[in-house]
Amino acid sequence: TVDYSWKVSGKDSGGSIGLRCKNVIAVGSGKGGVGKSTVAASLAYGLHTLGARVGLMDADVYGPSIPHMLGASGQPAMVEKQGEDGQTVRRIEPVVVDGLKTMSMGYLVPPEEAVIWRGPMLHGAITQFLKDTDWGELDYLFIDLPPGTGDVTLTLSQLLGLAGAVVVCTPQQVALLDAIKALKMFEKVKIPVLGIVENMSGDIFGRGGAQQASQKHNVPFLGELPIDSRIRIDADAGHLQKLFDDDSTAKPHLLKICERV
Ligand code: ADP
């Protein structure tokens, strides 16, 4: 377990408040719409169902979809906490959804509102999300990155020693080119890539492209999640958690990916 309190919270951390976590894992993609948030939320919830203490931070500040997918609503509460050094500090309580601790810009900005931020503001928001949220002690903190950009990734790599990153892509060749860019980006900021997940494999987009790309670029292949309207329906309806019900065809695929991460 790494205690990030001092690192992310600075002097006012109060010692015992902040983030203490064994594995901080970023989930990224070369472009949007490939199912990055779906995979991030599924990994987080899946590991929670396996008994781990898990947090999920939605760093996709431009298109925060995690609250909707998990059916979470409401605003995170502000609380005053006393740190080990006796100082009182104000912290944001993560919104707990079915045992999963979550934080997202979606809780703070009305859904129809557009977020337009320049790099430095983005840096500030991400830093605040991490340091001011009372995450407590976690086994895993998953961070859903915005698609493509390096800004947030750079901020995170400066703030935390990330255990690694998971890259999500779809099987077709054009999408793989973007995924490879994502691999290179993580390489540049020295975040180890834990592996690639192929999402939406099946008739429409083909199959196996990501596996080939992972072999070629020497990164592990974490598994595939077939294209399945039930995944879209459950995410749209705000109960992605149902993908872990016993009758869900996605469940064995998701559990395999969870185990490999
Ligand atoms: P991203 O975070 O990469 O923008 P999302 O996770 O928001 O992508 O997914 C984009 C859309 O695709 C959502 O409507 C989601 O429900 C749907 N989706 C994701 N994965 C699958 C899948 N394997 N099968 C069917 N629909 C999926």
Image (tube, helix red, strand yellow):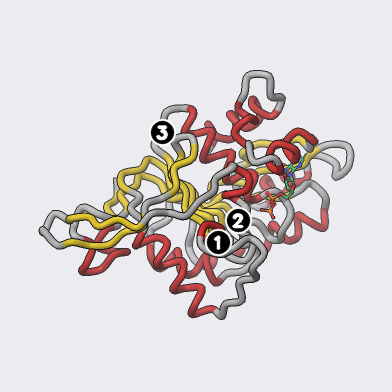
Write the residue at 78% across / 45% down: 209
| Sequence-earlier tag: 3 or 2 | 2
Question: In the rendered structure, which amino acid carries the disc numbered 1?
Answer: Phe
Lateral position of residue 170 relative to residue 2, left or right:
right
Badge 2 marks a residue whose secondary structure is strand
Please state which of the two labelled residues, at mark 3 or mark 2, is closer to the viewer: 3
Question: In the rendered structure, which amino acid carries the disc numbered 2?
Answer: Gly
Evaluate whether residue 192 shows in this view. no
Evaluate whether residue 36 shows in this view. yes
Tag 1–tag 2 contact (CB < 8 Å): yes
Write the residue at 82% across / 53% down: 173
Q: Which mark is residue 240?
A: none
Farthest-out residue, left? 86
Comparing 177 with 247, the one in front is 247
List the residue tagged with mark 1: 186
Q: Is mark 3 within 8 Å of ligand 1?
A: no
| Sequence-earlier tag: 1 or 2 | 2
Question: In the rendered structure, which amino acid carries the disc numbered 3?
Answer: Ala
Comparing 8 with 183, the one in front is 8
Mark 2 neighbour class, 10 Å CA radius: few under 14, some 14 to 19, many 20 or more: many
Badge 3 marks a residue whose secondary structure is loop
List the residue tagged with mark 2: 28
Write the residue at 60% across / 48% down: 219
Q: Which mark is residue 52?
A: 3
Write the residue at 47% across / 53% down: 103
Q: Classify residue 250 by image quadrant.
A: top right
Q: Residue 166 in the image: x percent, y percent?
A: 57, 49
Spatial CA distance of label 3 from label 2 is 22 Å
Spatial CA distance of label 1 from label 2 is 9 Å
Spatial CA distance of label 3 from label 1 is 26 Å
Q: Classify residue 138 by image quadrant.
A: top left
